[in-house]
Image (tube, rainbow, N blue to C red):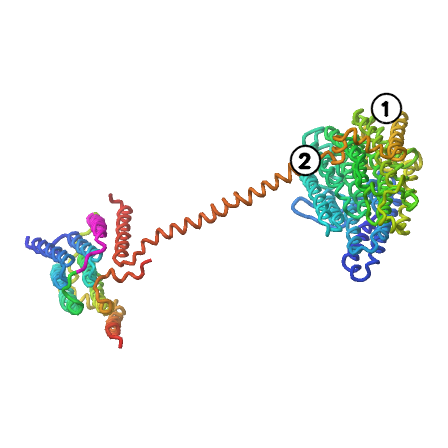
Amino acid sequence: MIETAYFASLATLAVLFAIGVIVSRNTVHSALFMVAVLFCVAMLYLSLAAEFLAVVQITVYAGAIMVLFLFIITMLTPTKEEGPNRLVNRLPWAVLLATAFLVGVSLMIVHGGTGRPPVGAVDGAGGLPALGGELFTRYLLPFELTSLLLVVAMVAALVLGKRRV
Amino acid sequence: MLSYAWLILLFPLLGFLYSALVGRLLSRRSCGIVGSLAVGLSFVVGLAVFFEMLGMPAEARSVELPLWSWIVAGRLSVPFGLLLDPLSVMMVLIVTGVGFLIHVYSIGYMHGDDGYARFFALMNLFVLAMLMLVLAGNFLLLIVGWGGVGFSSYALISFWFKKPENASAGTKAFVTNSIGDVGLLFAVFLIYLTFGRVDYMGVFSEAAGRLPFDGAMATAIVLLLLVGAAAKSAQIPLHVWLPDAMAGPTPVSALIHAATMVTAGVYLIARAHPLYLLAPTAMIVVAAIGALTALFSATIGLVQPNIKRVLAYSTMSQLGYMFLAVGVGAYAAGMFHLMTHAFFKALLFMAAGGVIHALAGEEDLRRMGGLWKAVPGMYVGFLVGALALAGFPLLSGFFSKDEIVYAAFASQRGSAVLGALALVTVLLTGFYIFRAFFLAFHGASRVEPEVAHHMHRPGGAMTLPVAILTGLSIFGGYIQFIGGPGAIDRWLEPVFDRYAHPVPLVAGAETLQEPLMVVSVALGLVGIVGAFLMYVVFPGAAETVGGWYPGLYRLLLNKYYVDELYSLLFVRTGRWVGELLSGPADGFLTEGIVRGAARVVQGGALWLRRLQTGFVRDYALAVLAGATLVVFYLLQVGGIR
Amino acid sequence: MIAPTSHYLILSAVLFSIGVVGVLVRKNPLVIFMSIEMMLNAANLAFVTYSYSLGKVGGQVLAFFVMTMAAAEVVVGLAIISSIFRIRASIDVDDVSSLKG
């Protein structure tokens, strides 16, 4: 009972916040709605026995990435209204196609399925031991490459951000 | 035995190579000597073959001589092989004998000409091709020789090609001959289809077995052969090239267009007689064409002002006689006339050439006259040739022409109509040739003063062959009587009796022989006397008579407007088609299809270009659209919906 | 799991679609970028859902990598956006249409 309410409310909130992201005229408002969405998703991760990921989501995604977004928003005339939308005639197409896409995927989900009941948590500790184990054994190379990726990203940001003198 | 016969081909080949490659650089004068020598040596070898053959029993006188393996393709194996038999040997002797005399004559006639070496090279080439034609042992080699003489004829007609008329004359000959070549080619295709082989001995021995008598295949084959023969021998309706061919030097006219190449058609029909005898309907066609051509060309020859053209139409007419002969099955008579005609027609051309040479190129009878004193040797030669042509008693032409007229009436495949046509032509022949004779050599001189001033007698190189041919024209007929009448028939018997039954004579026809002889002689004499009256006794009578029938006169003078008819039918049509294709049709094809395709692609590209709006969000929309399609595709595959 | 698998997945699809609409409709490059991040999140949700449903940890591993990469991507992307739009003095993604053709 409480589980259904938990999921239902989180889901509804996530959708409403998401709509808020794309609808807000004010960019800062959009960013804040985005943070809310990320938070709801993190809560859902908790219900999926992925506690580590939930925490990482909040820390990295909501905490770092969205903050970065906010920095840039404020740097680039943050609250200016958008000009007239020259491509307003694309809106019906976009909605139509997105709806069609959604319907299609939903059909796949409903008629698909693995044919088995969900197995459940990988192990009792939020999957963290298992997650760590995989990361440092099977996925060691991608893991190390990811760290290289982060370095590259930092350097790129520094270079791109330079003002030409 | 007879294995050395290939030398007959070797000498003209060497002569050609010498004149074409070496002689023109070393010594131009030597080309004439080498050329004549080459043909002379072939004649000697031919004589050797002839005498050796005489020593062989009659049935053994067909010797196949394969020289090398030429074509080997699947089941078809064609050697480069010669067939030595009485017919081919007879042709060899005529070609090389008369050819030799004409080569010697040319040394004098072509003296000083720029293309002296080229002339003798081409003449040797021609002799080579002609010998290949008559010596061939199979139809494919025949075609090689056939094409070779066609080319040489073209090259020699347009020898003085710097004048456009000469070049067109050569082209006209070549094109008309090509039509004949197509006929010949198709005939050989049919022969191969029917027999699976193309060698004479094989085809002829199996002919009776494989071709139903008077059947469609036999008739088709021989009619196609006739197309080839008619083109080569200038018979109706493919005769139009021969008068124009007189644009070539006179020795060319003498050799190619009188004595040898034009007889190739007659030779072909004679050679293929086993096939012809199986298609009597076609034989009638052959005889009819011959008789009609004989009459037709004789009428034209009555009014022509150019002396060589008179002789050209005369050749056409006499070839008609030969076709008539082989059309009614009188093969020996046809070959006999072929031989005597070679003698006296070459003589006539050479005498005319002597006159033309003396007059520095004048060929128009209206500007000649009274030349008997100036060129007596040519005068005598022309006279003898004319008498032989007209069938004056005891000269060569008399015997051979008589045999043909008799055969036209007497053969089972002949008819009185054909005979009558032949007789009328005899009358006309006497008239037209003596018209030319009297106009050229008698009466008041109408020669231009300029030309008359520079007249000179032809030299020894020209006079000697004329003298020899004069002798042959007088006595050549007696060849038929060596060892008794019918010597030539006996000589050729192994050929014409071998594969098919000869055409018998109508019962009781022998009684016609003497009366016919008298009639034809009489007719010839009437013609001669008529010409004498009109051109010597009453000069100016010709114009008066011409005034009585102006339309008829013009019709004859313009050769019945056949050339104009052909020009309208074929040349105009061809041009019209060409213009149609190069204009609208080409426009449709290139503009319409090719360019149109390009334009469609371009238009499509321009239209597609509108997708590149430059707006990133539009591209994202496109990606979404694609993704949606994939989703639905997967749904389909998964069996949902 | 407190709800059937399909509910999670449908939620993921809905969030993804909303993100798509955001990319297509908004002109502000930053909002577009945020919508892209939303799409990534939706995908992550799907991965984690399957990880739970199948009992394998691979889904979580992948979601982890996605998050890391999203961070790197955001860094570079924002650097690019800020360098473009600092020069142009407009924040309209339709202005960068010089590939029109």
Q: Looking at the image, can residue B503 be seen? A: yes
Mark 1 crowdedness (10 Å alpha carbons): few <14, some 14-19, many ≥20: some
Q: Do the residues labelled 1 and 2 touch (CB within 8 Å)?
A: no
Disc 1, SS: helix
Q: Which chain carries label 1?
A: B
Q: Does the magenta stretch include residue A99?
A: yes
Residue C66, quarter of the rendered image: bottom left
Give me the residue at 71% from left, 44% from top.
B174
**Highlighted magenta segment, given as a residue range:** A82-110
Mark 2 crowdedness (10 Å alpha carbons): few <14, some 14-19, many ≥20: few
Q: Mark 2 lies on which chain?
A: B
Mark closer to the chain start, 1 or 2: 1
Residue B6 appears at what percent x and percent y? 80, 50
Q: In the rendered image, which residue does mark 2 sit on?
A: B565
Q: Is residue B142 magenta?
A: no
Q: In this view, does B558 lie above or below B355?
A: above
Q: How far apart are marks 1 and 2 (CA)?
A: 42 Å
Quarter the C terminus of chain B occupies = top left
Disc 2, SS: helix
Residue B261 appears at what percent x and percent y? 78, 43
Q: In the rendered image, which residue does mark 1 sit on?
A: B509
Q: Which residue lies furthest to the bottom in this view?
A: A165
Q: What residue type is disc 1 on?
A: Ala
